[in-house]
Image: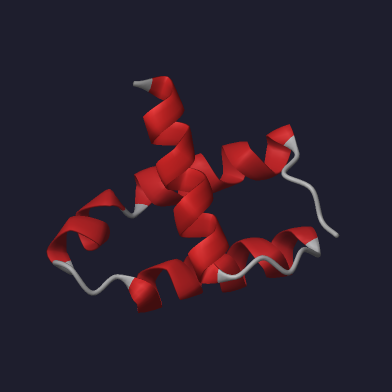
């Protein structure tokens, strides 16, 4: 089972930040958005998280920050 390492979390935050406009332009259907983030980060880091897992991790990071 893969772990959420600090570098992986930083990559997720950076990727989401970079694509912020795209995220907000999509409205409510963002499944494909998170899938493309998953594909890119997984390929770069040798991980296998799903788009849903990245979405949930990001949402939890935002919740914990607030």
Kindly indicate the quadrant of the structure image that contains residue 48.
bottom right
Residue in view at x 71 percent, y 70 percent: 43
Q: How many marks?
A: 0
Residue 32 horizontal side relative to residue 25, left or right: right
Residue in view at x 24 percent, y 62 percent: 22
Query: Looking at the picture, how far across and down is residue 1, in whole percent?
Result: 85, 60
| Snapshot colouring | secondary structure
Residue in view at x 82 percent, y 56 percent: 2
Q: Does 44 appear above or below 63? A: below
Q: Does 29 appear above or below 7? A: below
**Which residue ends up furthest to the top in the rendered image?**
66
Query: Looking at the picture, how far across and down is residue 15, in whole percent?
Result: 47, 50
Q: Is residue 14 visible?
A: no
Query: Looking at the picture, how far across and down is residue 18, in whole percent?
Result: 37, 48
Question: Image quadrant for the C terminus?
Answer: top left
Q: Is residue 36 visible?
A: yes
Residue in view at x 75 percent, y 39 percent: 5
Q: Does 59 appear above or below 66? A: below
Query: Looking at the picture, how far across and down is residue 31, in whole percent?
Result: 36, 75
Residue 44 horizontal side relative to residue 9, left or right: right
**Which residue ends up furthest to the right in the rendered image?**
1
Kindly indicate the quadrant of the structure image that contains residue 26.
bottom left
């Amino acid at each position: 089972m893969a772990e959420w390492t600090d570098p992986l979390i930083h990559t997720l935050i950076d990727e989401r930040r970079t694509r912020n406009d795209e995220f907000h332009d999509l409205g409510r259907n963002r499944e494909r958005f998170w899938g493309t983030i998953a594909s890119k980060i997984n390929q770069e880091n040798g991980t296998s998280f799903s788009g849903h897992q990245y979405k949930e991790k990001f949402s939890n990071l935002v919740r914990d920050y607030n």
